[in-house]
Image: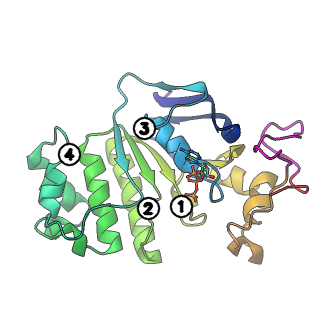
Amino acid sequence: MSKRLVVFDKIGISFDGRVLLDNIDMSISEGEIVTLIGPNGSGKSTLIRTLLGLQDATSGEIVRHKTLRIGYMPQKLHIDPTLPLTVKHFLALVRGVDKRQILPTLEKLGIGHLLGSQVHVLSGGETQRVLLARALLNRPNLLVLDEPVQGVDVNGQVELYNLIESIRNELQCGVLMVSHDLHLVMAKTDTVVCINQHVCCSGSPQHVTGHPAYQALFGVPGADESIAIYAHQHDHVHDDDGRILSDDSDAHAHNHTQCHH
Ligand SMILES: Nc1ncnc2c1ncn2[C@@H]1O[C@H](COP(=O)(O)OP(=O)(O)OP(=O)(O)O)[C@@H](O)[C@H]1O
């Protein structure tokens, strides 16, 4: 069985009595691509920040394998546009980087020609690849990608997901991605975890897309309403602090018809 790199064990996070994450159980193994989906504000980035050690959990714990080495790709590149900075110099800032690996890594991602380009003139897709290169230069066994295809057109999204899959195949690293796209990403994912403060459902893409909790959030795959990706009509009752007030026998499926928000 492949090594479990990270286990989230009943992670809960609250602020001022407001529950942002409740009882989150999930894990990522070597060679596994896990995609985290959920509506806006459902806690995806908060969960990622907790894994990165930027946010403390209020309850539960994250168990990290002793070999865990994370390569993180943020949503966006925040760099002062007036600052002259080439891709090469930007990537040379990675702590402990082997500078000889910069060009081969860019080439692997199909952007070797951008080595001398200024980072602030890159297109959306090029920027995402440079950020992916930066994550890879950290020699990770777990890639953490926060909305990796953001700002990329549909063809570019397909290419990026293919690239992520081929990196996983080559390195046998784990991949944890946050995605707002529900259709393209599914084909490239081993496990989908659908969260909305708590885990609504999780499993293979086929299992999750057929799950009532997923369908209540995102619509039935193939039906017209599936386009309304984030029409949030979920099926359980929370109190004002986001605590679930009712549940049924399936720990991950709820009756969302009386939702208060
Ligand atoms: N440090 C914090 N203090 C208080 N509230 C916070 C903090 N960090 C996040 N939140 C709140 O937690 C909720 C979840 O935010 P988060 O960014 O994790 O959601 P998300 O699922 O990533 O959303 P999106 O899809 O819009 O990026 C939001 O309502 C946000 O305002």
The residue wearing badge 1 is: 185
Among numbered discs 1 and 4, the one appearing first in the sequence: 4
Residue most extreme to the top: 66
- The x, y position of residue 27, in whole percent, is 55, 34
- Say whether residue 190 is visible: no
The residue wearing badge 2 is: 161
- The x, y position of residue 171, in whole percent, is 32, 43
Among numbered discs 3 and 2, the one appearing first in the sequence: 3
Nearer the observer, disc 3 or disc 2? 3
Picture residue at 50% right of the left edge, 27% below the top? 1
- The x, y position of residue 38, in whole percent, is 64, 55
Q: Quadrant of the C terminus?
A: bottom right
Q: Residues within 10 Å of mark 3 (few under 14, many from 20)?
A: some
Tag 4: residue type? Val
Picture residue at 55% right of the left edge, 42% below the top? 47
The residue wearing badge 3 is: 52
Among numbered discs 1 and 3, the one appearing first in the sequence: 3
Q: Which mark is residue 94?
A: 4
Nearer the observer, disc 4 or disc 2? 4
Q: CA distance from mark 3 to mark 4?
A: 16 Å
Tag 1: residue type? Val
Taken as a whole, is the magenta stretch helix, strand or loop?
loop
**Residue 159, above or below 188:** below
Picture residue at 56% right of the left edge, 62% below the top? 180
The answer to whether marks 4 and 2 mark residues whose Cβ atoms lie closer than 8 Å is no
Q: CA distance from mark 2 to mark 1?
A: 7 Å
- Mark 2 close to ligand 1, CB under 8 Å: no
Among numbered discs 2 and 1, the one appearing first in the sequence: 2
**Residue 161, above or below 67:** below
**Residue 95, above or below 7:** below
